[in-house]
Amino acid sequence: MLRVVIFDFDGVIVDSEMMHFEAFNRALQPYEVQISKEQYFKEYLGLTDRDLLKTLVEEGTLAINEPQIDEIARKKTDIFEETARIAPIIDGVSEFLELLEQNDITSAICSGALSAEIEMILNNANLRRFFKVIVSAEQVVKGKPAPDGFLVTLEKLNEKSSESIKANQCVVVEDSHWGLEAAKAAVMHTVAVTNSYGTEELSLAEIVVDSLSELKMEDLQTLCD
């Protein structure tokens, strides 16, 4: 039985992936490091800000020490927040959230984005009320593709629920293979939207759609039966 739909944020709810990409490059400019768009989408998109920067260090691309990782991450956040106030909500999201609410299905967010970014965008779009739980990068030690974020989300949902919710009663909506791997590892069902990647790169998902407007309640219920 379907109980919960857990959404990724960037690339699923809000069209902000290019904003993150551009913010990273602006923050990295003083260090004479730039990420290509192809690199970002192929290798880094599903990572948290700190994990992306740590990966650049481990690869030898970025020669900095540990404290500088936090410094660059803060700078990237400041740059992103300058533009994210006008980040567009992806078509079909608002209507899909209303459909879930009408059918008494709980909505939650599990994202590698920062809490302040998520809250700001949701509040500006008048969508915050739809989400019972929001788990952001600060609340998870290991980001996607590790399942930790989804497991924390389920734990927090159960703290607010009178009846225990099981992992296989949750459907996760993702836009990248990192998120799909994490959801699979958490033993949750998966839907992918082709907002960031093509169908062939989202083959881990049980259902792949071009827009959330294509999904019907029967589709989601069937996954959890």
Image: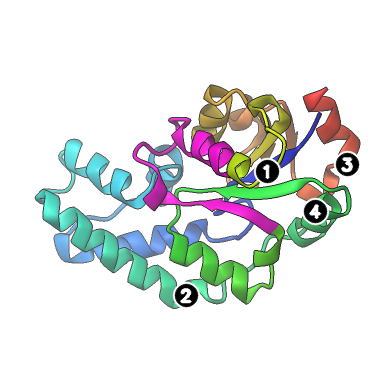
Q: Secondary structure at mark 2?
A: helix
Between discs 2 and 1, the one toward the N terminus: 2
Numbered mark located on residue 161 in the image: 1
Q: Measure how far apart labels 4 and 3 are at the Cα level.
A: 9 Å
Label 2 environment density (alpha carbons within 10 Å; few <14, some 14–19, many ≥20) = few
| Residue 44 location (% of width, % of height) | 39, 43
Query: What's the distance in space between the residues labelled 2 and 1, CA to CA?
Result: 36 Å
For the C terminus, the image quarter is top right
Sequence-earlier tag: 4 or 3: 4
Magenta-colored span: 131-156
Number of residue marks: 4
Q: CA distance from mark 1 to mark 4?
A: 22 Å
Q: Secondary structure at mark 1?
A: loop
User: Badges 3 and 1: C-beta atoms under 8 Å apart?
Assistant: no
Query: How far from the left and from the top, in percent, is residue 192?
Result: 67, 37
Mark 1 / mark 4, whichever is N-terminal: 4
Residue beneath the point at 68% across and 43% down = 161
Callout 3 secondary element: loop
Amino acid at the residue labelled 3: Lys
The amino acid type of the residue labelled 2 equals Thr
Q: Give the Cα distance between marks 2 and 3.
A: 33 Å
Residue that numbered label 3 is attached to: 216
Disc 2 versus disc 4: nearer the observer = 4
Tell which circle, 2 or 4, labels the residue nearer the N-terminal end. Answer: 2
Residue at 61% x, 67% y: name it.
122
Q: Nearer the viewer, residue 100 or 175?
A: 100
Residue linked to disc 2: 83
Q: Secondary structure at mark 4?
A: helix
The quadrant where residue 116 appears = bottom left
Q: Which residue is mark 4?
A: 96
